[in-house]
Image (tube, grey):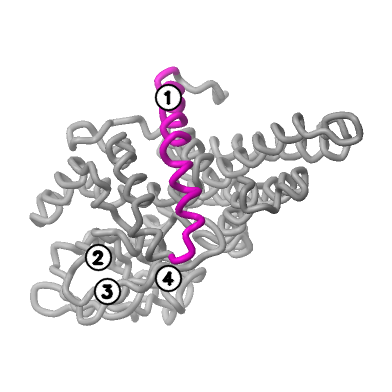
């Protein structure tokens, strides 16, 4: 049977991260959320201070191996750590989720021998104390989003195209405004069509610098929630990409790679939702035990107590299924339907929990001064992030 008791080293790390996140990330997340203009928010001192603090803490290289300059924390700790980060701030937690993608690939896949950029980038990344270096995963496009898994129709392919030319490729097209960390990243994991006649199997996977000539970024998206996560379009106008930057050529290996990434991504979205829901529940519970109406604490009123119990039940059930998916991934047996079940349970549950905690707090719950008002807005985005829950559910159902 699976032991739900965290090992001592992971529990120590969890507590350490929790203290750091609440002291350093939570105030920055709240401040960034209140800045009306996204460009101002992501250029502002609040964001810079949060990145400096996180990189000084070593958050960006937590799971990189020690021989590559990382902290070398066990990947089994990632579920507990991500929940703590999300409880302090779902937007910044999402930012730090994508930050190490390129550095992690360079450290684990031997890319450093293929091009000088990779070795230089990894060295700069692990030594970074300012939050300058980070990555983005650019896959979805304005006209290609939820159909990324439609491998049945050869005519269905990514519209951004890499055309072979000389010693590399010429890339043209655009990635959608939902590229997480698309505005700040200086390295990009890029999926584009190389052989469109093969449909989605004609996709090539590139790992590229974020400042190649011809690359540009759109304005960061102005969003309802998760406002501390920068998301922006990336445009490619006759961008030359050296052949050495092609990590995975088109072919049958693309589909299992995408499924592994989506399995991990859905589990992570669920864990962020878990942290947001837990934070809302803790605020609602504390308020209900303090607030008095009718001569007693509102926690003693049955309807209020029922909402709080339902929130507790949802959080515990979500965590159990998310931990199962995380355990399967760490065991080398990632299961996409399990990950998608955990993600949809957690994100739908997060929406319900934050809604009910706003209700428990009444007029205070809808005030911008209340923490649950922000958490309620954040929850809505998590039902859409990395695919709407409806599409995610249909994708999982097709694999049962």
Marks 2 and 4, how far apart at CA: 25 Å
Marks 2 and 1, how far apart at CA: 37 Å
- Dominant SS in magenta: helix
SS under mark 2? loop
In the rendered structure, the answer to whether residue 169 lies left or right of residue 198 reads left
Residue 10 sits inside the magenta stretch: yes
Task: Decide which of tag 2 and tag 3 comes sooner along the chain.
Answer: 3
Residue toward you, 23 or 281: 23
SS under mark 1? helix
Residue toward you, 19 or 65: 19
- Which residue position is annotated with label 1? 10
Q: Which residues are magenta?
A: 8-37
Mark 1 or 3: the one toward you: 3
Label 2: few (<14), some or many (≥20) within 10 Å?
some
- Which residue position is annotated with label 3? 216
The spot of residue 249 in percent (x, y) is 25, 65
Marks 2 and 3, how far apart at CA: 24 Å
Task: Decide which of tag 1 and tag 4 comes sooner along the chain.
Answer: 1
The spot of residue 19 in percent (x, y) is 45, 29
Q: Residue at x 30, y 47 (%)?
A: 100
User: What numbered label is drawn on residue 177?
Assistant: 4
């Amino acid at each position: 049977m699976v032991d739900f008791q965290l090992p001592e080293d992971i529990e120590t790390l969890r507590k350490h991260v929790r203290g750091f996140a609440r002291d350093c990330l939570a105030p920055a997340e709240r401040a960034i959320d209140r800045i009306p203009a996204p460009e101002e928010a992501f250029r502002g001192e609040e964001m810079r201070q949060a990145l400096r603090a996180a990189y000084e803490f070593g958050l960006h290289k937590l799971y990189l191996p020690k021989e590559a300059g990382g902290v070398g924390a066990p990947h089994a700790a990632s579920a507990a750590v991500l929940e703590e980060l999300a409880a302090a701030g779902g937007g910044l937690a999402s930012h730090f989720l994508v930050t190490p993608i390129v550095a992690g690939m360079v450290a684990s896949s031997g890319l450093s021998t293929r091009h000088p950029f990779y070795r230089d980038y990894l060295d700069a990344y692990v030594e970074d104390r300012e939050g300058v270096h980070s990555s983005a995963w650019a896959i979805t496009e304005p006209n290609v989003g939820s159909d990324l898994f439609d491998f049945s129709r050869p005519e269905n392919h990514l519209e951004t195209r890499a055309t072979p030319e000389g010693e590399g490729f010429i890339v043209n097209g655009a990635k959608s405004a939902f590229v997480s960390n698309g505005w700040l990243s200086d390295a990009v994991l890029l999926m584009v069509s190389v052989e469109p006649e093969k449909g989605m199997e004609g996709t090539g996977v590139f790992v590229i610098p974020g400042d190649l000539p011809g690359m540009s970024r759109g304005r960061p998206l102005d969003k309802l929630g998760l406002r501390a996560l920068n998301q922006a379009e990336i445009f490619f106008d006759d961008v030359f990409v050296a052949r050495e930057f092609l990590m995975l050529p088109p072919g049958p290996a693309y589909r299992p790679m995408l499924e592994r990434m989506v399995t991990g991504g859905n589990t992570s979205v669920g864990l962020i939702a878990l942290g947001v829901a837990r934070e809302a529940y803790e605020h609602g519970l504390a308020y209900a035990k303090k607030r008095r109406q009718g001569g007693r604490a509102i926690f003693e009123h049955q309807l209020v107590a029922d909402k709080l119990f339902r929130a507790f039940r949802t959080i515990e059930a979500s965590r159990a299924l998310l931990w199962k998916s995380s355990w399967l991934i760490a065991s080398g047996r990632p299961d996409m339907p399990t990950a998608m079940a955990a993600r949809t349970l957690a994100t739908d549950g997060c929406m319900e929990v934050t809604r009910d905690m706003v209700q428990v707090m009444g007029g205070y719950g809808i005030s911008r001064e209340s923490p649950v008002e922000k958490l309620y807005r954040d929850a809505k985005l998590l039902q859409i992030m990395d695919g709407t829950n409806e599409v995610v559910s249909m994708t999982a159902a097709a694999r049962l």
